[in-house]
Amino acid sequence: MKIAIVGAGGHGQVVADIIRASARACPELSLAGFIDDRHELEGTFVAGAPVLGGLPDLARVDADAFVIAIGDNATRAQIAANVCASGRRLATVRHPHASIAADACIGDGTMISAGAIVVTAAHIGRSAILNTGCTVDHHCQIGDYVHVAPGVHVGGEVSIGERTLVGIGAVVAPRCRIGAGCTIGAGAVVIRDVPDHTTVVGVPARPI
């Protein structure tokens, strides 16, 4: 299966590394190249892969599926919707050095980085990002288009609503409920529920 990456920035290059690492164990998997709307990149190579055009060129790109490698949750959600509306598939990519329980459910288009751990009965939504070295414990519900940043630890039975960002190094205590569209600050420790569209920071985490 040939996978194209939408977004040729730093996050896109991380996804390219995931695809290449996975291809060493699964030779039928390959990186088709990048899709990026920056005109100065068209026809160039990024991280050794060609930039195939911008989003308007999506229909003609020779790829079987796409990963949206955009860190901003709202932008990633919009582009993912456009890709699906065009009849193209979203690919889920998992680094071979991630640990994913056999009964975990991973949504289409999700990216799981090296060192990430997803424990039994966890449910991860569509086009989510589980970044480097994060942990998602048992029976968690992670919504669509969530970004769990590097080094985050999410305790068991936690629920995180769609399009929420959990910042680098944050900790979420077991059974907490975090709403949709929230921002959890870097290094925050969440010990109580967080309502929709709330930003919290600190130890313990408090709204700002």
Image: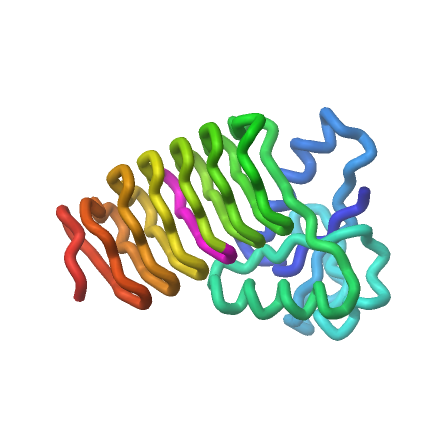
Q: Is residue 143 magenta?
A: no
Main SS class of the magenta portion in the image: loop
Which segment did they paint magenta? Answer: 144-151
Indicate whether 95 appears above or below 50. above
Depth check: 152 or 160 in front? Answer: 160
Q: Residue at x 78, y 50 (%)?
A: 32
For the C terminus, the image quarter is: bottom left
Left or right of 53 on screen, residue 205:
left
Left or right of 159 on screen, residue 113:
right
Q: Residue at x 67, y 70 (%)?
A: 82
Residue 153: which quarter of the image? top left
Indicate whether 101 appears above or below 60. above
Q: Is residue 147 magenta?
A: yes
Residue 9: which quarter of the image? bottom right
Depth check: 45 or 137 in front? Answer: 137
Indicate whether 71 appears above or below 139. below
* Residue 39 drawn at (x, y percent): 68, 73
* Residue 36 drawn at (x, y percent): 66, 65
For the N terminus, the image quarter is: top right
